[in-house]
Image (cartoon, helix red, strand yellow):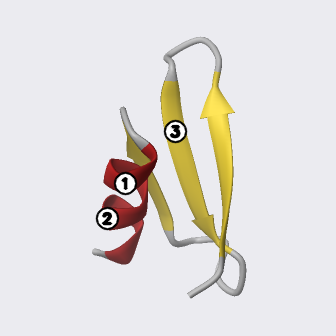
Amino acid sequence: MQYRLQLDMKTQEFIAIDQHDSHKVGRGLTVEQAIAAMKR
């Protein structure tokens, strides 16, 4: 799975976005949490 990572500077949350389906998004305090949330 390929994904993009962003950091929301206001909330200090990482955002993982699936490169093939931009509707699959996950947020978390760590990169790992954001990726796990995106996979659900």
Q: Quadrant of residue 36?
A: bottom left
Q: How many marks?
A: 3
Relative horizontal placement of residue 5, taking residue 29 as reference (left or right):
right
Name which residue lies at 51% across and 19% down.
Answer: 12
User: Badge 1, how many Cα within 10 Å: few under 14, some, many 20+?
Assistant: few
Q: Residues within 10 Å of mark 2 (few under 14, many from 20)?
A: some
Q: Please tell me in which quadrant of the rendered image residue 32 appears.
A: bottom left
The residue indicated by pointer 2 is 36
> Toward the viewer: 31 or 22?
31
31 in relation to 35, above or below: above
Measured as percent of width and height from the top left, residue 28 is found at: 37, 41
Amino acid, disc 1: Glu
Q: Earlier in the sequence, mark 3 or mark 1?
A: 3
Disc number lying in front (2 or 1): 1
Cα–Cα span, label 2 and label 3: 11 Å
**Measuring 36% from the left and 76% from the top, which residue is drawn there?**
39
**Number of the front mark, 3 or 1:** 1
Q: Secondary structure at mark 2?
A: helix
Q: Residue at x 55, y 57 (%)?
A: 16
Which quarter of the rendered picture does the N terminus lie within?
bottom right
The residue that label 1 is drawn on is 32
